[in-house]
Structure formats: C-alpha cells, structure tokens
Image (tube, grey):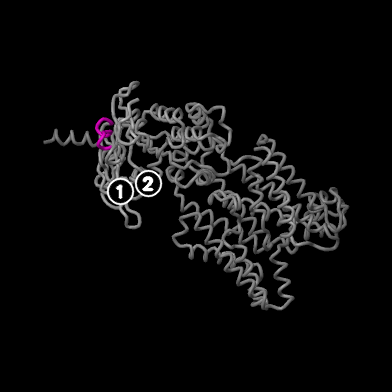
Amino acid sequence: MKFKYSFITIFSLILLIFSLLAATVIGSVDLTFGQVFETLFICNENQNSGIQNSCSVDPVYQKIIWEIRLPRILMAFLTGAGLSITGAILQSVTRNPLADPYLFGISSGAALGAVLAISVFSSGIISVTFGALSGGIFSVILMLTLAGRAVLQVERLLLSGVAVSFMLGAFTSLIIYYSDPDTASTLLFWMMGSFSNSQWQDLLLPAISITIGFILFLIYRSWIGAIQAGDEGAFTLGIPVNQLRLMMLIICSVITAILVAQVGGIGFVGLMIPHISRYIVGSTLHKVLFMCVTIGGSFMLWVDVVAHSLIPDQVLPVGIVTAAIGSLFFFLILKSRGRAL
Amino acid sequence: MSSIGSSLNQQHSSAVFAADKICWLVDEQLILDCLTFEIKAQEFVGIIGPNGAGKSSLLRCLYGLNEICAGELTFQNKPSHTYTRRELAKQIAVVVQEPPTHFDMKVSDVVAMGLIPHKSLLAFSSPQEQITIDNAIEMVELSEKKNAAFNTLSGGEKQRVMVARAIVQNPQVLILDEPTNHLDIQHQIEVLQLVKRMQVTVILSLHDLNIAAAFCDRLILLDKGKIVADGSCDQVLTQQNLKNIFRIDGQIDQHPFHSGRRITFNFTDGKVNEI
C-alpha cells in the first residue's frame, strides 16, 4: 500500500500545522483557534508598533500562549523531528532496523551527567542541561575509544554502544541508590522526559543542530542510501564508507545529546517514526527524512497534549506516554503490514 | 631497439589490469600467493577454482577493497593504489555477491546508485539521468518492476537489477563475483548474455565449468591462492586439471551446440558416464 508522494507530502504538512495549532489550543486553560490566531498574528504586531486595543485577547492568555505554550510546543516538535531523523539515518548507516538515537548510550550518558549535576554539584554551579550535554557527548567519545578498530564493523560498533550504555546506566543507578529521596525523584522525573520547563532560549541549540543535521543528511542522501544497500557495494561506488558512517554517527550523537539535555530521555520515537515513514513513502531517503519531520513532529505534539490532559491538573512524563502510545501504534502498523504482504 | 620498445609499450597499453607477483594475506595467512597475470581490454575472463581458492579475494584486490601486501597491480598503466576510490568507481563497476536486502528499497533507487561516482553530491537529479536509469532497467527487462521493492524480486531479477546498476555506472571494466549463484539455469545464461552484450572488459568468478566454457574467452584457474592454469578454455579445462584441482573425474569433448567444450562429470565410481 503506497500512496502518491505529493499527496502524502501535502497531507502530512497539513497534519503538522493542524497539530501545532491544536497543541496551542488544548491545555489546562482552554483557548479557541481565534484567540490563538489573534495572539500570534495581530496582537504581537500591535505591541511592536505601539498601537493598542485592536487585540481582544486577554493579556494573561497572550502570556500563556507566548511564554508557556509556544516554547513547549516548539520544543516538542523539535524533539519529535530531531529524534526521528537521527533514528532514520542511524538505521540506514548501520543497516539495523533496531538502531535508534540512544544507540551509543547517549541517553544513559546524559542521564549520568544530569544526575551528577543534580546530586554531586547540587549548589547549581553547573546546570542540569549542561551536565546532560557533557554526559551525552562523553558517552559517544567513550564508546568510540573503547570500540577502537571495531568501529569499522557495524555489528561490533553496535555491541560497543550497548556495553557503554549499560556501564553508564550502572553508575547512574548507583548514584540514585545513594542519593536522598527528593533528589532521586527529581532525577527519575527528569529521565522520563518533559517539555514543561522549556524556555525560548532553550530552543536555539536544538533548532540549529537539527537544521544543520537535516541539511547534511539531505546532501549525503545518495551515499547514505548506498551504505544502506551494503558496505561493499557502496565501496565499489567510490564512497568512503567508514568515514561517512563515522561522520553520520557523530552528527546524530550531537543532535541527540542536545535534545536529551533539554527534555530528558524520550525513547521509542527515534526507533518507530522512521519505520512508519518508510511504510508510508518507501525507503527513498529524502522522502523518509521529510516524513520523519512532519510525522515525528506531529506525533510528539500529540504526545505532549495527552501528557497534559490525560489526568486533570497533572502532567505525565512524556517518555511514558510516548512509549505507551508508540508501541500500540507500532503494533497496529506491524499487523496491517503483515496482512498486506 | 626503439621498435621493440614501442611494441612493448603497445602491448602494455592494451592491458587493463597487470598484476605482477601480487600477494594478499589475512592474519598472517597467505590467501593470494604471488599472482602474475594480465587482463586485456574487451576480454571476458573467468576466474575458476574450488571453494577457498581465493577467487573473491583476487577480485577484491582488483577493485581495491583488498590492499595487496606485495607485488604490483597496475590498472590502465598506472599503479592501482594511485587512483582515488572515486576514479576507480568511474571505470570499474562491481556486482558483489551479497545483494542489498535492507529496508525494501525500490528497484529504480538501487539502479540509480550507479550514477553516484559520476555525480557531485550537490547535483539535483536531471531528466537525462532518469532516462539513463529507465534505459538500463529496460535492458534487463524489468521495466514493469521499476517501482517494486527490491526484496520482493526473485534471485534472478535481483541479479539483473545489480547488472542494471552496473550499466548505469557506465564502466570500462565490469567485475562480477559469482553472478550466477542461486540462479536457475535459464537465468544464469540470461545474466551472462546480458553482461556479454555490454561489450566491456569482464572479469568474473564462476563455479559452473560448462557455463565458463560457454562464455569466457579466457580462464584463470586458482587453487590455494596460486594460479594453476591461465589460458583459453581449451588450455585450462583439461581432464588433468579436473582431477588434480577439482578432484573429480570427467570427460571433456566438443559441445554439441556451440564451439566450446563440454564437460561431463563422472560421479558414479570410476567409470566415465556416457550420455
């Protein structure tokens, strides 16, 4: 079952825009599309030019939209899109359908960094974000160092990643085990992922890294496609297979580390959305990447909506909702696909 | 003096590959042991030999995946290692043993990869390229499966797709590693006829000696990493070689349908089987 690509593109774009708007409207304070539209496109311009009163939206609502919801929603979108495209690339260059952005223990490295920042340097000398970012990047460096020459073989590379992941995970558990209950619950909540504390300035680094990554993935798409078809075949086409794979791994790691540092551990999106995208548009890489942005972004927005509205006056950790919705969705896809084949 | 020099030169320039005592080892084990041979332009050369003789290793040396550890390998009169991978890829197309199986890629996507060596990363695909791809797919008679997933094809169709990719690559030399593996007899012949029509230098490894006799201009027989025989099919496919290298008795006679040889194996003990 393959649909026409142009139709799917337009449909997925509409879905994304609708999801963005819907996520802005739905929340503990229910707004209307009209209020959101007015706030975004009319009120703001008037504020800038100093003209008042043509804007009928309550300033409190404006504040909710501009300072709470928009940063949170854009962070959700960036996370969904970013984890999905890195997942797609990692699955291609390792030719492993189970590869995901947390392949090299980036998630456990970031968790360890965050844990250290919260519990050991609790005086706030370094922020959780910075701790997580350094932890994530450290895990990648550690993995590449430990793997040594094994980097040249995909299977051994993946195994080294798993080993690093468990090693760092053990340290994190150890620290949580010895920390006081308050710190422990803060850490656990952080590890389950959340968009709630996102500020405008937090969006900058994820946005830049994802944009650069996306452009590089598009530029190298034909080479990545050839690697996806096999290392030896790619070699005979004149592609520097190992160097390219290493470069892609590092780009993906940086994007993931930046995202994990901001929003915590959100699993499954990076694994699942690429498969769903391939199911819809086939495995031509630039189409898959585009689908990952729109579908991955929309999916994360709805996850955020559900996390905020499922239980009144309470925000569920995003990681839990992602895994729950995601796995159900994935089963459906696998089932329908099984029938089609 | 000068005439000898020029004739030598001429002889040299017609050689696509010239290997002079090349060796290749893995974990201190010599896989290819001092091979010397030349392959001329437009030749159709079959590499034959028992399992583990070094056929694939030799082909990999030719297309640069294996780096030789001794001797000299020249390609188009220049040492092979002085070429960049991209330069080699523009002139040598390879059909490797393992076809791609991951993430159901489309047939036309796989074929389009043949353009990679000739194309800048930043170039957009042009309508001209699409025509090249479509023509290649038509040549291998898979036009109606152009948009099918590669995984859903049969073994013979997959191999034809890989040949189409090689056609798109527009090489001077085509190297195929056991291209007839897993194919039924009709598709074995089809694939090789297709390759023959490309009119380029072809170097391929084969197991079926009758197929080798029917298609190759020349055979190189390998055993335990050494060249045991190198020459025309008549010279290489002898009863002695069958017995000593392949360890099977056989009768070799004129093929009833083409000018080459026919080999009839005798696997009932001792007595030669007449058909």
From the image, tell me which residue sits under label 1: B32
Label 1 vs 2, first from the N-terminus: 1
- In the figure, is residue A304 to the left or right of A79? right
From the image, tell me which residue sits under label 2: B84
Q: Residues within 10 Å of mark 2 (few under 14, many from 20)?
A: few
Front tag of 1 and 2:
1
- In the figure, is residue A202 to the left or right of B164? right
Q: Is residue B90 visible?
A: no
A204 is higher (above) or lower (below) than B56: below
Residue drawn at the location 45% of the way across and 62% of the way down: A148
* Residue at disc 1, secondary structure: strand
Task: Give the residue type at disc 2.
Answer: Thr
* Picture coordinates of residue A116, whole percent (x, y): 63, 74
Task: Give the residue type at disc 1.
Answer: Leu
Q: Do discs 1 and 2 belong to a common subunit?
A: yes
Residue drawn at the location 66% of the way across and 45% of the way down: A276
- In the figure, is residue A272 to the left or right of B2? right
Q: Which residues make up the magenta segment? A: B233-241
